[in-house]
Every structure is written in C-alpha cells, then in structure tokens.
Image (cartoon, rainbow, N blue to C red):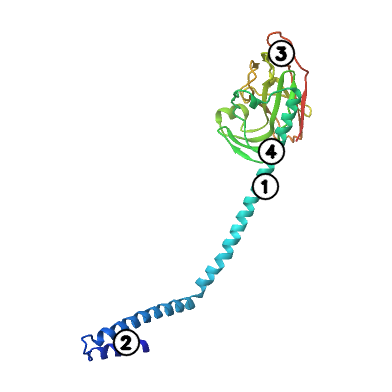
Amino acid sequence: MWKKWLITLAFTVSFSVKDLGGLSYFDLVGNEANELLTNNFSDEDEESQVERENSNPSEKENQNQQIPNKAKENDVAEKKEAEEQVRKEDKETKEKSTQDQDKKEDKEKGVKMPEDKAGFDEYPKGQFAVEGAQGETVKTDTGTFVIEKQWTNLSKVYVGPMTIKIKNINIVSGDVTDSAISGISGEKVKFVQVDAILQNTSKEPIGFPFAAATLHIGSKNLFAHDMFSGMTNVNFDTQIPRNTTLVYMLDDPTLNISEVTLKLAKLPVNKKTKEEMGKRTSINVSL
C-alpha cells in the first residue's frame, strides 16, 4: 500500500516542477514511477500466487500424491512386461531345443528338413480344428471351443521313407453354433484333434493313407471323422511336406483323457513297385 502512495506523490510533484534545461521532472520521475509500478505489480502477482497456494494446499498435495502413484503404476507395468518377455523367451528356447533335436535326428538318418525343400502344401484343417494353447477358449465360425489338454512338438516318427511330425494333440470340447453342423455332430461336442506334418523323403512316388490311423483311448478304438477332419491326400509324389489334421469325435463328453495312442493302420507303399515299406508303429502320448 505504501508503494502506491509514493507513486501518487511522485506524479503530483512532477506536474508542478520544471527543469530549466527543458527536460521536465515529469519525464524523469515518470520513468521511475513506471518502473516502481511495474515492480509493484510483479510483487503483487507473486504475493497473489503464494496466497492462492496457501489457500488451496490440497491441490499441491494431490499433485505430490500423483507422483508416487504414477511411479507405482509404471513399476507394475514394467514388471508385467518383464515377466511376459521371460515367458516368451522360455517358449522360444523350448521350441528351438525341439527343432535342434529334430535336425540332429534327421541328419543322422540322412533326411533333409522341410525348410530345405521348395514350397509347402497347405491343406485346409477342417471345420472343427482350433489353434491355441492349453486352457484357451477359441471362437470359430463353427462354434466356441476350449482346449482342455494339449501336447506339442512330439518327436518325429520315421516309417519307411515317410517322416511324421506330430505338431500337437488337442483334447477339445465346446458348443457348436453352426446349425448345419450341429444337426450332425450335436450342439455339444468333445473331440481329439491331431495335427501332423508328413513328408516323403525318397525320390520315389509314395502312397500313404495316414488318415486311416486309429486312436486308442483306454478300451475305445476311434477312427478319424471324414467330414470333420481336414483335407488329406494319400499320394506323396514329391518331397514337398504337407500338413494333415485328423479329428476323432468322442461319444462321452465327460470322458477324462490322460493317455492316447495313435496307431498306423497302413504302411507306405511304393507306387511303382507296389511294395510296402517300413514297419507299423504307434505313437503313445501321456497328457
């Protein structure tokens, strides 16, 4: 307040006194007054800011509280990201270990890996086939399914010139929403899905009806369902690998499956000589 009084007094004196040299005291004092006025306003702005902060401490406290909360959220996010990265690396390491083992076995047997071949025959997997990990719920055009159990990356099986790689065996249950299919399969289903990659490693044309393989669960002997399994082809005239998906429907949805056995019903046949090749074998899987 005293600053404003001094400024007013300075303006009053400047109006009544003149400098003999032609420069008025109004000009001199007026400049000083403007500077004082500017400084006074700046002081008032700072005082007002302090008063506002003192009158509303909760706003400052809230800002201070937000800092540790945000830091905590960042820590949680970083921890979650790190755990996800570890899981991803573990999965990649496991897959690489399996692939390395397969390469070692193929090298010992003189078999070239599929990636050394030109192309890949990608066949449709069928209406019931699902992709995912154990415990996942998968929605398709056919229905909604749960992968109850799963076994992946089984070792390769060699039968004559044929290499059989079981990618996964899934125990799947779910609800069929496609009315055209549910009329045949029923609205609730349970089935075993077998995904395999087959390859003829010889230069001779080979016939191999892999889809004739039977699935044994306890005392039950099951055959792959023609309609719900994926496309298959018994003719392996080249060394190009191809995928095959077989679906074995289960009559009892409550059946608890802990072990399955896949038995080859027929052997590979040389299409030129009609000679059967290799020995019948079984693939046992404990889930």
Q: Where in the figure is residue 36, as x and y percent of width and height?
A: 35, 83
The amino acid at mark 2 is Ile
Which badge, 2 or 3, comes first in the chain's sequence? 2
Q: Which residue is mark 1?
A: 86
Are there few (<14), some (14-19), or many (20+) residues within 10 Å of tag 1?
few
* Real-space Cα separation, disc 4 to disc 2, in angstroms: 88 Å
Q: Which mark is residue 7?
A: 2
Which badge, 2 or 1, comes first in the chain's sequence? 2
The amino acid at mark 4 is Glu
The amino acid at mark 3 is Val
Q: Secondary structure at mark 1?
A: helix
Q: Secondary structure at mark 2?
A: helix
Which badge, 4 or 2, comes first in the chain's sequence? 2
Which badge, 4 or 1, comes first in the chain's sequence? 1
Q: Which mark is residue 127?
A: none
Q: Are marks 4 and 2 in contact (CB under 8 Å)?
A: no
* The N terminus, quarter of image: bottom left
| Of the two numbered discs 2 and 1 in the rendering, the one whose residue sits closer to the viewer | 2
* Real-space Cα separation, disc 2 to disc 3, in angstroms: 114 Å
Are there few (<14), some (14-19), or many (20+) residues within 10 Å of tag 2?
some
Residue at point 37% right, 89% down?
A: 2
Q: Which mark is residue 148?
A: 4
Hey, which quadrant is residue 9 in on the image?
bottom left
Q: Which residue is mark 3?
A: 269
Are there few (<14), some (14-19), or many (20+) residues within 10 Å of tag 4?
some
Is residue 159 or residue 213 the one in the foreground?
159
The amino acid at mark 1 is Val
